Amino acid sequence: MEKKNIDWGNIGFGYVQTDYRYVSTYKDGAWDEGGLTTDANIVMNECACVLQYSQSCFEGMKAYTTEDGRIVCFRPDLNAARMVESAERLKMPAFPEEKFLEAIKQTVKANAAWVPPYGSGASLYLRPFMFGWDSIIGVKPANVYQFRVFATPVGPYFKGGVKPLTVRISDFDRAAPRGTGHVKAGLNYAMSLYAIVDAHEKGYDENIYLDSGSRTYIEETGGANVIFIKGNTLVTPKSSTILPSITRRSIVHVAKEYLGMEVEERDVALSEIDQFEECGLCGTAAVISPVGTIDDHGRLIHYAGFGPKIQKLYDTLTGIQMGRIEAPEGWIMEIE
Ligand SMILES: *Cc1c(COP(=O)(O)O)cnc(C)c1O
């Protein structure tokens, strides 16, 4: 198959329209057969539930080419399961997990020419999403929904070398106790925009949010979980208002089973973060972004950036993804 003529190393992270996307509609209590379309636009009524009341959730994942030339996805079953959780919390119908995997396969196969080659550092980002479609004015869930998956190629995250991040402890909150912080709802992002623009204006790369109940413990950033390293121990915050990152869960497994590290998933107090040697943010986009500095209202805490442990975790997990290191059973779904 002929690849698109793209400078894969320099595409950055922006929307590029690809050839096919998957669409399925839920109506009269059931999802239809679903299938591919070339139409990238959605036409809906001005009173659509998603436009008025933000009834939407999404997922983010990647397809990429392994060392031996296979096109694969990393643990897509966990994205499928997480989307069911998100849908339930937002009173949307679950999109069946088997159908989700089928939709991913169809979308990637149809856009195989857009999957970057091995070694380019680029990948095909996949965005499954779902929204309330019909006209709703009184506050209640929609009756009609669309589930879609589109694909867009994204460049290597650490292009031109790694610059460890400078992040601040945010005065804004991300998630309320017993709220929606643990699901991938669009509304969590809408209300984080103010804080992220403000952070950028003040020279920070990201916000680290505290638990909004007591403002004592570290939670996560707007789109990535946090890990800390102390000696041979990986410490990561545990909280019911953190989004359960698939990357973080995979890193925990790699730390224990591949690297023989100790892992503590527990409350991490803001007051103890100067005890750690390394810090990283984890999510699908970068796998791990090393943190160089946390600024807690002028109290500066410095970390090793890509220190020895975070480097090892990064190399092992990306090695598993790319097929250079044997993956645990079921972690890699082959597309073709
Ligand atoms: C998507 C997301 C992450 C990262 O999850 P991955 O499954 O690792 O990509 C972390 N935090 C938030 C708030 C997110 O929305």
Image (cartoon, rainbow, N blue to C red):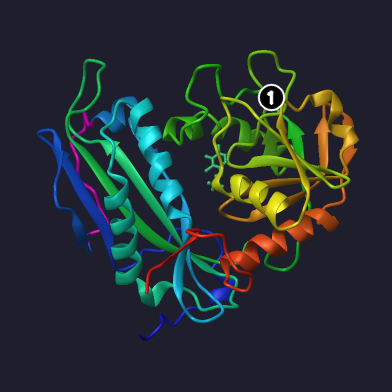
Q: Residue 46 colored magenta?
A: yes
Question: Would you say 96 lies left or right of 30 here?
Answer: right
Q: Can you see residue 111?
A: yes
Residues 251 and 142: in front is 251
Q: Residue 258 colored magenta?
A: no
Residue drawn at (13%, 37%), measured in percent from left and top?
A: 27
Q: On the rendered image, what quadrant is the C terminus found in?
A: bottom left
Residue drawn at (22%, 32%), measured in percent from left and top?
A: 48
Q: Amino acid at mark 1?
A: Leu
Residue 156 drawn at (x, y percent): 61, 66
Label 1 CB less than 8 angstroms from ligand 1: no
Local crowd size for mark 1, using a 10 Å CA cut-off: few (<14), some (14–19), many (≥20): many
Query: Which residue is identified by label 1?
Result: 210
Magenta region, residue range: 39-48
Residue drawn at (38%, 37%), measured in percent from left and top?
A: 57
Question: Would you say 116 lies left or right of 269 here?
Answer: left
Indicate the secondary structure of the residue bearing disc 1.
loop
Question: Can you tell me which quadrant of the image ligand 1 is in?
Answer: top right
Residue drawn at (51%, 79%), measured in percent from left and top?
A: 117
Q: Can you see residue 163?
A: no
Give the main secondary structure of the magenta stretch. loop
In the rendered view, would you say 145 is above or below 33?
A: above
Q: On the rendered image, what quadrant is the N terminus found in?
A: bottom left
Question: Within the image, what quadrant is residue 85 found in?
Answer: top left
Residue 49 drawn at (x, y percent): 25, 29
Residues 179 and 165: in front is 179
In the rendered view, would you say 177 is above or below 209?
A: above
Question: Within the image, what quadrant is residue 155 found in?
Answer: bottom right
